[in-house]
Image (cartoon, rainbow, N blue to C red):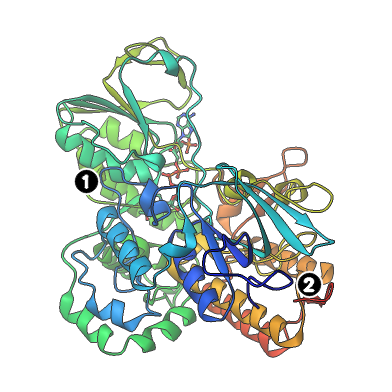
């Protein structure tokens, strides 16, 4: 297929407006998708609202931002040359280095020429007659595409602060998730951080180093485990680089897209001493290893309580003031039921004289004044800079932003108002030729995101090639396949403690309280096996059609 199908012959100078595939978002998924689909022979065009590639690593440039997956596996292993030549500095690289890496990847694969930067897609209307999407942009552009590929990410629409009085604030305010690409003065400033999820937990210790005073506004404490970051083990990286191609299958075989040591025993199979030894070992390893101490910690409340008690003990040891330690300890939900935060000296930061924890549980922020933040009890906290780390409208936020409409004028989120319904996270009934990369119903944010993206895009690429080879040009899942997959996604999450805890991965139906866990918790390895089976069975579950005279 080429962009000239059914159109007059193009010249070099023609401004093309029709493409086989339009790719929305130029983060790690978009960069990979553009080069991959192009290599497969499809004409591609990308749109990116930011001024450069990078996605989350473009926008989340807050102090302390870094990945919590080891660089060894948070790399484009599809490109052995890039893998071998890149010298990561740290075990868990910081945002500037990751952004440089993604820019280098975009340059090496020459994808920038396909991307319109500073351009947001504001409409994508499915046209069943023409069998394509009509795409409009905020710069006035109109395009058409046979396939619409959303690499816009699942955590890319920040929750904006809506606090009353924010407009009157005389200081400066920023969002971690949309940190401006200019110097923000933090040195010597009185700073407030609102939000203590992964972003807040990373920013707080770094801001504390420079602030004259730092107020941390905490509504719900999170469990955080040490990263034990440090220089990258270059010897180990070098060994991996010698046989990069061997890494990919290993990542796909792992439940999380990272080859970690998965536990083999439930807590009940171990003595209390053995349990403590395992906990200490996992704590010393740090990061997401701590989700993997016992096989049953995500499902068995008694086991989970053992892990919780261990972390509480660590918090008590780290924090000098017992009252502050108590406030930092989550006590009303199991560990691992909200995403574990991974930190560098987070708890110890609260021993600093210039750091103050403001507990706003039951004493919410009431409004913002010219000088600072007022809580419901009337206390005012005067600051120069407010950092909002409020999280994202996950999973559907970026789709809604793009305003994708089916032939009835509905958006995916209209149809998903009782929770997402997808086939393999990739497609949803009623939206032909729409591909949501790392969408709900795929491992998505539960796995190493670079693996989630590449695996999903490879699958979509195989599907499109299969269609082209057979003369098909329209695809959507069968209702039966979508229902079965959605049922399976619900079934594998049904026994998890985390299903009943408020967090952005759970969709709650307010009328009857029913809950839907949005990403697929069956593991990357199981998901890959299912995808392989679907491919082997001629893409079973997808309904293919040949519409009109052209592909
Ligand atoms: O967002 P969050 P995040 N008043 O939703 C608080 C990825 N990530 O950006 O819990 C006061 O976790 C809210 O309080 P509560 C990762 O997948 C990865 O930190 O609702 N507070 C909470 O404390 C992660 O899971 C990395 O009570 C308000 C915070 O804001 C995901 O992004 C780094 C409030 C939001 O926490 C999201 O993390 C960073 C209000 N009105 C992020 N509204 C790494 O790779 C919200 N809050 C390491």
Image position, residue 66 (x, y; %)? 30, 54
Q: Is 303 placed above or below 379 here?
A: below
Image position, residue 62 (x, y; %)? 30, 43
Which residue: 22% across, 86% down?
239
Q: Is residue 283 visible?
A: yes
Separation of residues labelled 1 and 2 (CA atoms): 51 Å
Location of mark 2 (residue): 481
Which residue: 37% across, 88% down?
245
Left or right: 398, with 370 as reference point: right
> Which quarter of the figure is the N terminus placed in?
bottom right
Which residue: 26% across, 60% down?
93
Left or right: 350, with 394 as reference point: left
Name the residue nearer the viewer: 168 or 356.
Answer: 168
Q: Residues within 10 Å of mark 1 (few under 14, many from 20)?
A: some
Name the residue nearer the viewer: 392 or 269.
Answer: 392
Name the residue nearer the viewer: 104 or 317.
Answer: 104
- Helix or strand or loop: what does disc 1 sit on? helix
- Helix or strand or loop: what does disc 2 sit on? helix
Image position, residue 534 (x, y; %)? 69, 83
Q: Residues within 10 Å of mark 2 (few under 14, many from 20)?
A: some
Location of mark 1 (residue): 317
Q: Is 88 placed above or below 405 here?
A: below
Label 1 vs label 2, nearer the camera: 2
Q: Quadrant of residue 533?
A: bottom right
Q: Does the beta carbon at disc 1 come under 8 Å from ligand 1? A: no
Ligand number 1: quarter of image: top left
> Which quarter of the figure is the C terminus placed in?
bottom right
Left or right: 383, with 196 as reference point: left
Name the residue nearer the viewer: 130 or 486.
Answer: 130
Q: Quadrant of residue 146?
A: bottom right
Earlier along the polypeptide chain: callout 1 or callout 2? Answer: 1
Give the total of numbered labels: 2
């Amino acid at each position: 297929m080429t962009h000239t199908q059914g159109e007059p012959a193009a010249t070099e100078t023609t401004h093309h407006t029709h493409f086989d595939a339009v790719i929305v978002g130029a983060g790690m998924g978009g960069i990979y998708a553009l080069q991959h689909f192009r290599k497969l022979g499809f004409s591609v065009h990308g749109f990116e609202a930011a001024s450069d590639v990078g996605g989350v690593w473009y926008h989340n440039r807050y102090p302390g931002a870094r990945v919590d997956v080891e660089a060894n596996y948070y790399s484009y292993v599809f490109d052995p040359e890039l893998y071998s030549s890149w010298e990561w500095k740290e075990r868990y690289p910081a945002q500037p280095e990751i952004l440089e890496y993604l820019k280098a990847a975009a340059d090496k694969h020459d994808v920038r020429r396909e991307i319109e930067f500073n351009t947001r897609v504001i409409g994508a209307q499915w046209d069943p007659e023409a069998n394509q999407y009509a795409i409009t942009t905020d710069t006035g552009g109109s395009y058409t595409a046979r396939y619409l590929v959303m690499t816009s990410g699942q955590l890319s629409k920040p929750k904006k602060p809506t606090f009353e009085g924010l407009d009157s604030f005389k200081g400066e305010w920023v969002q971690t998730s949309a940190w401006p690409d200019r110097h923000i003065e933090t040195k010597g400033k009185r700073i407030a951080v609102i939000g203590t999820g992964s972003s807040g937990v990373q920013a707080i210790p770094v801001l504390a180093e420079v602030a004259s005073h730092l107020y941390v506004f905490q509504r719900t404490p999170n469990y955080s485990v040490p990263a034990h970051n440090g220089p990258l083990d270059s010897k180990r990286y070098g060994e991996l680089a010698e046989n990069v191609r061997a890494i990919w299958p290993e990542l796909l075989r792992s439940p999380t897209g990272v080859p970690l040591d998965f536990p083999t025993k439930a807590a009940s199979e171990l003595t209390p001493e053995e349990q403590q030894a395992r906990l200490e070992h996992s704590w010393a390893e740090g990061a997401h290893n701590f989700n993997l101490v016992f096989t049953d910690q995500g499902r068995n409340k008694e086991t989970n309580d053992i892990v919780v008690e261990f972390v509480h003990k660590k918090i008590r040891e780290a924090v000098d003031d017992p009252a502050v330690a108590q406030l930092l300890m989550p006590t009303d939900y199991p560990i691992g039921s909200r995403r574990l935060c991974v930190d560098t000296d987070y708890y110890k930061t609260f021993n600093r004289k210039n750091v103050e924890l403001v507990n706003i549980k039951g004493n919410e922020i009431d409004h913002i004044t010219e000088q600072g933040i007022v809580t419901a009890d009337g206390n005012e906290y005067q600051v120069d800079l407010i950092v909002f780390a409020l999280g994202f409208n996950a999973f559907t936020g970026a789709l809604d932003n793009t305003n994708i409409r089916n032939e009835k004028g509905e958006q995916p989120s209209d149809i998903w108002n009782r929770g997402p319904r997808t086939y393999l996270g990739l497609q949803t009934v009623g939206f032909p030729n729409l591909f949501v990369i790392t969408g709900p119903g795929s491992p998505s944010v539960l796995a190493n995101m670079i693996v989630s993206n590449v695996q999903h895009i490879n699958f979509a690429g195989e599907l499109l090639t299969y269609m082209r080879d057979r003369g098909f040009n329209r695809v959507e899942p069968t209702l039966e396949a979508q229902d079965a997959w959605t049922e399976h996604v619900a079934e594998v999450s049904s026994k998890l403690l985390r299903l009943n805890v408020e967090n952005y991965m759970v969709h709650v139906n307010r009328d009857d309280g029913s809950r839907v866990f949005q990403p697929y918790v069956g593991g990357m390895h199981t998901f890959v096996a299912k995808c392989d089976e679907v491919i082997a069975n001629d893409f079973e579950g997808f309904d293919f059609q040949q519409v009109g005279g052209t592909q």
